[in-house]
Image (cartoon, rainbow, N blue to C red):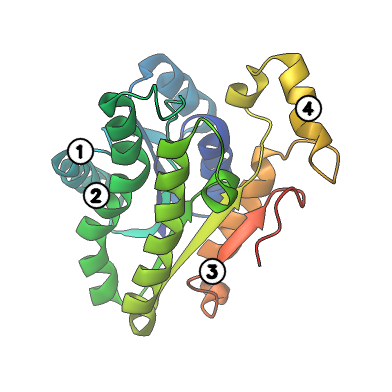
Amino acid sequence: MTKVALVTGGTRGIGHAISLALKAAGYEVAANYAGNDEAAAAFTKETGIKAFKWNVGDYEACVKGIAEVEAALGPVDVLVNNAGITRDGMLHKMTPAQWREVISVDLDSMFNMCQPLIAGMRDRGFGRIVNISSINGQKGQMGQTNYSAAKAGVIGFTKALAQEVARKGITVNCIAPGYIDTDMVAAVPEKVLDGIIATIPVGRLGKAEEIAHCVTFLADEKASFVTGATITANGAQFIAG
């Protein structure tokens, strides 16, 4: 029976690549998105993957959205928590709204998405959860106290949940990408981008497809002994001990 995968933030950037990779691996894929209807429509037309709109920072919206996905495709076997936003600023200038919005979408979403799905995975004795963190959740980044805190929290959440569900056939893992060649990174001024690349030992930005490959590995049934792990995919820019 075909397994169902749900990718949050799955219509653009890294999420787009993850959705395509999972479809190519034989999964029935649902892609969540938050607000860009035009991009979501173009994504579905291009890929044939259904897109579902809701805010992952809102628990009730997640419950409703997951129910819609499962009604359309069946129980979710693989969850990829990829959705994330930035609202950068130095802490002394950061507003409560900037802090709260990033924590809500990037960290609260871990609970909002996993909690409604975990009981079903436990009952079925199988599940794969892959959470997308960031290099900046590992090393910190000036001007991103909100984002770094949220992404560090994703790693801690992953480790704790992995222990809770290990005996139920569910794995929970994390990927911490470095700087990836997406539209968001491409928008960085050229001189700044050149400076970033200079700090990456492999001498280039990562590719979204490389992160997607990590996801398909962790989602596979044969990866059942890998849980509670964080894969650092950053070209050796930061090497976690």
Amino acid at pointer 1: Asp
Q: Quick one: label 4 or label 1, which is nearer the N terminus?
A: 1
Q: Which residue is mark 1?
A: 58
Callout 2–callout 4 Cβ contact below 8 Å: no
Residue 9 pos. (x, y %): 42, 36
**Vertical arrangement, residue 48 with respect to residue 116, above or below:** above
Q: Is residue 15 left or right of residue 135?
A: left
Q: Quick one: label 1 or label 2, which is nearer the N terminus?
A: 1
Q: Quick one: label 2 or label 4, which is nearer the N terminus?
A: 2
Amino acid at pointer 2: Asn
**Vertical arrangement, residue 114 with respect to residue 12, above or below:** below
**Vertical arrangement, residue 85 with respect to residue 220, above or below:** above
Q: What is the secondary structure assignment of the residue under circle 1?
A: loop
Q: Residue at x 33, y 76 (%)?
A: 165
Callout 4–callout 1 Cβ contact below 8 Å: no
Residue 152 pos. (x, y %): 46, 53
Q: Which residue is mark 4?
A: 195
Q: CA distance from mark 2 to mark 3?
A: 21 Å
Residue 238 pos. (x, y %): 70, 52
Report which quarter residue 84 is drawn in: top left
Q: Residue furthest bottom?
A: 167
Q: CA distance from mark 1 to mark 2?
A: 7 Å
Q: Quick one: label 4 or label 3, which is nearer the N terminus?
A: 4
Q: Which residue is mark 3?
A: 229
Q: Residue at x 18, y 44 (%)?
A: 59
Amino acid at pointer 4: Gly
Q: Quick one: label 1 or label 3, which is nearer the N terminus?
A: 1
Q: Which residue is mark 2?
A: 112
Report which quarter residue 1 is drawn in: bottom left
